[in-house]
Structures are given as C-alpha cells and as structure tokens.
Image: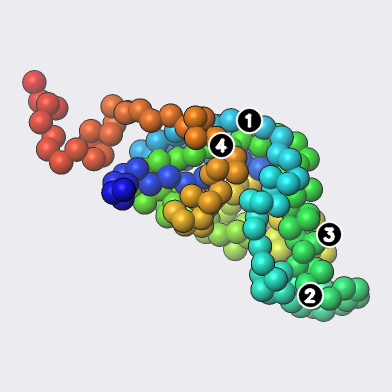
Amino acid sequence: MSEKHPKKERTLVIIKPDGVQRSLIGEIVSRFERTGLKFVALKLLVPKADQCWAHYNKDEEWFLKKGNRIIEDRTNQKLPIEKEALEYGKDIIQSNVDFFTSGPVLAFVIEGNQAAAIVKKIVGGTEPTTSDVGTIRGDLTVDSYALSSIDNRAVRNLVHCSDSPEEAEREIPIWFAPEETVSYRLVQDAILYDVNLDGILE
C-alpha cells in the first residue's frame, strides 16, 4: 500500500471541558480554520473513563518522570511528600481522566500538510503560563503546573492535540470510527495544493 500524500496527514484535537464551559469553541476552531487545515470529523461527547485511559497510554517511565516533578514542586512549596513518585505520576492521569469525564468535550480530526506540527504550534506548550503569546494556551488561560500540583488536579489548558502524526494515528480510532470521518474537497484546496493554478483567471 502506498503512503498517503502529505496533504492527507491527520491529527486529533479535543477541546477539553474548560474550553467548552468557557464558551471558547468558536475562538479555538477559528484559529485552525484560518490556517487552511480541513475538518474531516467532529463531535460533541462526554468521554468515558476507559476511553481516556486508552487515550493517555502512559508507561512507568512517564509516571516516574512526572511524579518526581510533583515531588520537586511540593518540596519547593514546603508541602509534605505523602506518596512515591510513581503514585504521584499515576495521579496525574487519574486527575486528567476525572477532568475529561466531567463534562462535554468537542473532538475533531484535522487534515492537511504538516497537520500535527501546525496544530501543536497553534495550541502552544502544555503549561499555559509558559506557553507563547499568540497560542491558544498562551492567550486564553492562566493555569500552571505548580498550581495544579498544589491543588492535586489536572492542568486546565483548554485543548488536547496529538504530539505527532504517528500518535494521531493511534489516538483517532479511540475517538472516531472510520465511518465518522469524511473525505471531501474544499475550494481552498486548489490554492493551497494544486501544482498549476490554471483556472483562476477567466
């Protein structure tokens, strides 16, 4: 089977419960639309816990790394260390699952050249307080790792996006059945991708 054309690359985006509750759906969606990326699947749903655990798909190394950071934050804040790093790391995913399942989210699949990289650039870094100005997380929210760690909750950073095309291929089937995605052509595809621009002038 031949590889897909680069303009057919797909990535997953989920507007989390905080984005939905703060009525930021239109603002967030419009930022992706303006790039020329194409929406090929979209739905509003309340996620299930098992769906979220499958989505996060973290291993022990990840749990330890994140848990050690929590211990460092708690030490800096002069808070007691009550658990091992591994437990603190697993608590991150549990708190994310609790957050994801707390209310509706808007999940969608976006298609286009370098879709995963472009979406990541628009969304910004995971931590809102250190995310660049001009990004969704940098412009529209104020949470931080330190605050969420102290409060023992998920970082409220508005949006999930796949880290890479490969990760998107793993994540998309967790949220969408194949028949829920639509293949179609936008008028703008011609100006973005056609090799020859014949037909623009009359």
Q: Amino acid at mark 4?
A: Phe
Query: Which of disc 3 and disc 2 is earlier in sequence?
Result: 2
Dot 1 crowding, Cα within 10 Å, few <14, some 14–19, many 20+: few
Residue designated by label 3: 151
Query: Which of disc 3 and disc 1 is earlier in sequence?
Result: 1
Residue designated by label 2: 85
Above or below residue 151? Residue 178 is above
* Res. 14 visible in picture: no
Residue at the image point whose x is 64% and y is 58% from the top:
57
- Secondary structure under tag 2 reads helix
Q: Nearer the viewer, residue 150 or 161?
A: 161
Query: Which of disc 2 and disc 1 is earlier in sequence?
Result: 1
Residue designated by label 4: 176
Q: Kindly report which numbered mark, 2 or 3, lies closer to the viewer in this rendering.
A: 2
* Res. 57 visible in picture: yes
Query: CA separation, marks 2 and 4?
Result: 34 Å
Above or below residue 87? Residue 131 is above
Q: Amino acid at mark 3?
A: Asp
User: Residue 109, how many percent across, how many down?
Assistant: 49, 39
- Secondary structure under tag 1 reads strand
Query: CA separation, marks 2 and 3?
Result: 17 Å
Query: CA separation, marks 1 and 2?
Result: 35 Å
User: Residue 188, how many percent across, how many down?
Assistant: 29, 31
Residue at the image point whose x is 82% and y is 64% from the top:
150
Query: CA separation, marks 3 and 4?
Result: 33 Å
Horizontally, residue 82 falls left or right of residue 146, namely right
Residue designated by label 1: 44
Horizontally, residue 25 falls left or right of residue 194, namely right
Query: CA separation, marks 4 and 1?
Result: 11 Å
